[in-house]
Image (spheres, rainbow, N blue to C red):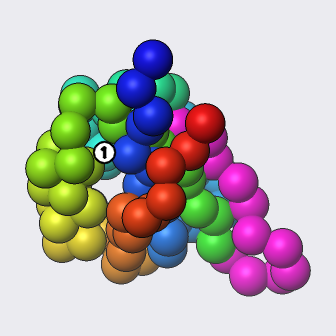
Amino acid sequence: MKNPYRVLVFGLPRGTTLDEVSVLVGASAASHPIVVDMPGNNDQSMAVVDFFEDTSVARRAVDRIGRQTHQGHPLKAWLCVLPWH
């Protein structure tokens, strides 16, 4: 099995659902996202999403996500450079 390209999505408001993240990242995601509330009293969560196709698909998703907001929160996405197993 090919190692996934992992994308981290930051800036989500606390309480963002998996369905909402799935819509934000699009149908090219290879797995259901994982949503994690950031520690502390802030109103932030992050999501982890894997892509298996190729790096260009993951890079396009990062660019697309970075131009979006969710419930008034600007989003930022990073493509991890190391492979995940």
Residue 39 in magenta stretch: yes
Query: What residue is shown at x 17% (from left), y 66% (from top)?
Result: 63
Q: Nearer the viewer, residue 3 or 20?
A: 3
Left or right side of 3 for 77 = left
State the residue in front, 81 or 35: 81
Badge count: 1
The quarter of the image holding the C terminus is: top right
Give the magenta part as a residue range. Answer: 33-43
Is residue 20 visible to the viewer in this orientation of the structure?
A: no
Query: Residue at horizontal 40%, vertical 26%?
Result: 2
At 49% from the left and 73% from the top, the residue drawn is: 11
Q: Left or right: where does residue 9 sit relative to residue 47?
A: left
Mark 1 Cα within 10 Å, few/some/many (few <14, many 20+)? many
User: Would residue 15 be visible to someone looking at this image?
Assistant: yes
Name the amino acid type tagged 1.
Val
Taking 2 as reference, is 38 above or below it? Answer: below
Residue 73, percent across and down?
42, 76
Image location of residue 57, percent across then percent down: 16, 44
In the displayed orientation, state which residue is furthest to the right: 40
Label 1 secondary element? helix
Residue at which label 1 appears: 25
Residue 20 picture location, percent across and down: 43, 41
Q: Looking at the figure, which quarter contains the N terminus?
A: top left
Quadrant housing residue 59: bottom left
The residue depicted at 84 percent of the width and 81 percent of the height is 41
Q: Is residue 38 rendered magenta in the image?
A: yes
Q: For this view, does 37 lie left or right of residue 21? A: right
